[in-house]
Image (cartoon, rainbow, N blue to C red):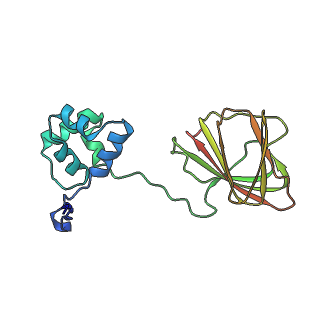
Amino acid sequence: MTSRRTRVAQPVQDRPAVLIGARLRASRKQRSLTLDQVAQAAGLTKGFVSRLERDDVSPSVASLVAVCEVLGLRVGDLFDPPVTAVLRAGEGRLINFGGQGAVERLVTPGTQSSLEVIHSVIEPGGSGGEELYALACDAECAYVLSGTLEVVLETGSESLSAGDAMTFPGNAPHTWRNPGTETCEVLWILAPAP
């Protein structure tokens, strides 16, 4: 008979007051490091680092500093609250990238540099113009909420309907248009923010 190890969750009152494990794990994975690699470089055991990432232990200052050095983090970064921003419906800043027949609203704050989201409402016949243009971002994604959108690239065009998404390099020359007879609603996601 095979025995199974079951994990017993710590009662809430026994857990550390500040949860840092998820941030440590995310940082480790972002750097493509294994638990073994972090443990060896920090002079700790793999089990301890694993428990640290699950918030099952309260580390000493020395242990925490050692792990943070391996991960390239400042210890203080682990305790900073996440920066959040909420924009309510209709609060986004109106913008215009030169399109015609479209109302475009920036729905991410201007302080956000890693991502930009634009909500576009495009009237029938509305477009980004006849000339192809490029944006200073690595990736662009168009997600169609309603209606039909045609995305035109140098290599051809793609017709998208509600629920469809298309991702392409933002610096690839492109434009778009609403070829349908109904209003088209699109979310544009740009990363990083141009």
Camera-side residue: 130 or 91? 130
Residue 8 % position (x, y): 19, 65
Give the residue at x 73% y 46%. Answer: 96
Task: Please give the name of the residue rendered at 70% of the width and 33% of the height, measured from the top-left corner.
Answer: 134
Residue 16 shows in this picture: yes
The N terminus lies in quadrant: bottom left
Q: How many marks on residues? A: 0
Whether 53 is drawn above or below 32: the answer is below
Relative to 53, 103 lies left or right:
right
Residue placed most toward the observer, 94 or 29: 29
- Residue 22 position, x and y percent, is 31, 51
61 above or below 18?
Answer: above
User: What is the residue that sits farthest to the front in this orientation?
Assistant: 1
Q: In which quarter of the view is residue 124 placed?
A: bottom right
Quadrant of the rendered image containing residue 56: bottom left
Instruction: Note whether 62 is above or below 160 in the view shown.
Output: above
In the picture, the quarter occupied by the C terminus is: top right
Which residue occupies the foreground of this view, 34 or 135? 34
Residue 43 % position (x, y):
14, 34
Residue 42 placed where, x, y %?
18, 34
The answer, for residue 99, to whether it is visible in the render is: no
Residue at (29, 37) in percent of width and height? 73
Q: Is residue 13 toward the left or the right of residue 188 in the image?
A: left
Picture quadrant of residue 152:
top right
